[in-house]
Amino acid sequence: MPSVLLLGAGSDIAGSLARKYASTGYEIQLAARKVSRCQPLKQDIGIRYNVSCSLHEFDAAKPETHAAFFESLPVRPDITVSIFGYLGEQKIAESDWAECERILQVNYTGAVSILNVAANAYAAQGHGTIVGISSVAGERGRQSNYFYGSAKAGFTAYLSGLRNRLYPLGVHVLTVKPGFVATKMTENMALPPLVTAQPDAVATAIFEAVRKKKDVLYVKWMWRWIMFMIKCIPEGVFKKMKL
């Protein structure tokens, strides 16, 4: 039976992905820093879909534990999905290195660390799929979130290079740029409905993109063009904008 590992399983997107994959017969491995919070999801999946679902402690900020974590899984997952992220507080991070470091570590260093482990395992066996949830925020730095955006920019570049390395070895790497998503992380933000996706829609889009072996996924198609236009603004103009 195929299996999927969801890193950052406490998120809304992870919950939707878990149910989507479970509904198609995948065994589910839920990994999170506070994994006890995933117990209700584990029970729901077991009852609703009658597939195996296991819980695993995982901390993105502790890269020294990542290799042992991956090797300790009951079965090697066919698909590894990195969902975890930390938006953080831009204003605090500007003067507090601890907050800045956490944003960078969770969104870039931690993700690269665990996906390197998965990548090497998949390269050795000649098959596997890696999915990285990046962000459109990484396509151009803005004063409102440039720490988060810079980490996601690095993560997007990493996934591109990883895809280039692993394609000849039979390993699929998918970069996902969801845009705005209505989740717990964004519940206090006034998001424009037209360009905001729901977690279930994100999960379905990711599932189909993996099936079709796509390279890059913008969950809502308009984000590709929104970001294209933003990137076309001359720097002399862009630096004066309140973004």
Image: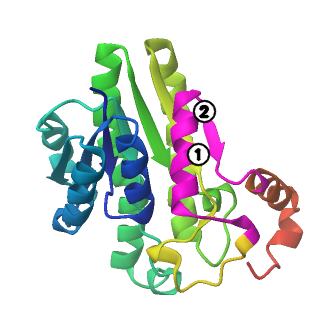
Percent position of residue 217, x then y: 63, 43
Frontmost of labels 1 and 2 is: 1
Residue 32 lies in the magenta-colored region:
no
Residue 117, position in %: x, y? 28, 35
Whether residues under marks 1 and 2 lie with C-beta atoms below 8 angstroms apart, the answer is no
14, 155: nearer the viewer: 14
Q: Earlier in the sequence, mark 1 or mark 2?
A: 1
In the picture, which quadrant includes the N terminus?
Answer: top left
**Is residue 172 in sight in this rendering?**
yes
Q: Which residue is located at x 65 percent, y 84 percent?
A: 190
Q: How many marks?
A: 2
Q: Which residue is mark 2?
A: 215
Residue 205: mark: 1
- Which three-letter amino acid code belongs to the residue tagged 1? Ala
Q: Residue 59, can we see it?
A: no
Q: Residue 193: which disc?
A: none
